[in-house]
Amino acid sequence: MIKEFSAGGIVFSSKGRSASGRKKQKEELLWLVCQHSQHKGWVFPKGLIGDHVEGELKETTALREVEEETGVKAKIIIPLKSPVSYFYAWQREKRFKTVYYFLMEYLDGDIKKHDLEMSAVEWWDEEKVKKDLTYKSDKEAFKEALKLL
């Protein structure tokens, strides 16, 4: 069995500020999600650590993958405490993947400029993320991200 290690981001964006200039509450945030071109699942952006640069840090991988897969530049706020782990099969081979997610805040970018690995990139509100993310592991990571906010 092959072991893989990936890093990615759970990225939020504020819809703006209230008339008083205060930041809006977390339920008014939008969350970055993408639909994978191959398996069609709605997921958070992530990718293999060190597949571009040997010795690449988790944080660097997460920022790079978010930008490549979604067209969005973000900054890391805090790492999630618990990595996500799961099994999957690729080319008839069983793999065990561990994903290190980081809570991130949107800085800049255009979701229309995502790469071909994703067939769609969208901003969703909290309820849609909770309801429509494809995988249980991503839903659990999202719950942790909400607690950290």
Image (tube, rainbow, N blue to C red):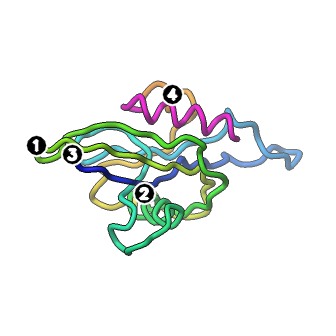
| Image point (23%, 40%), residue name | 39
Which residue in the structure is indicated by mark 3? 1
145 magenta-colored: yes
Sequence-wise first label, 4 or 3: 3
What's the distance in space between the residues labelled 2 and 1, CA to CA?
28 Å
Q: Give whichever of 11, 92 is nearer the camera.
A: 92
Q: Amino acid at mark 3?
A: Met
Q: Amino acid at mark 2?
A: Thr
Q: How busy is the neighbourhood of tag 2: few (under 14 within 10 Å), some, or many (20 plus)?
A: many
Question: Relative to 63, does residue 132 appear above or below in the rendering?
Answer: above
Q: Which residues are magenta?
A: 133-149
Sequence-wise first label, 3 or 1: 3
Query: Is 32 positioned to the left or the right of 20 in the image?
Result: left
> From the image, which quarter does the N terminus lie in?
top left
Sequence-wise first label, 2 or 4: 2
| Image point (45%, 55%), residue name | 7
Which residue in the structure is indicated by mark 1? 92
Mark carried by residue 130: 4
Q: How busy is the neighbourhood of tag 1: few (under 14 within 10 Å), some, or many (20 plus)?
A: few
Indicate which label's residue lies in the foreground, 2 or 1.
Answer: 1
Find out whether the residues at labels 3 and 2 contact each other: C-beta distance under 8 Å.
Answer: no
Question: Is label 2 in a helix, a strand or a loop?
Answer: helix
Which residue in the structure is indicated by mark 2? 70
The mark total stands at 4
Indicate which label's residue lies in the foreground, 4 or 3.
Answer: 3
Question: Relative to 10, does residue 64 appear above or below in the rendering?
Answer: below
Find out whether the residues at labels 3 and 1 contact each other: C-beta distance under 8 Å.
Answer: no
Check the image and name the residue furthest to the bottom.
53
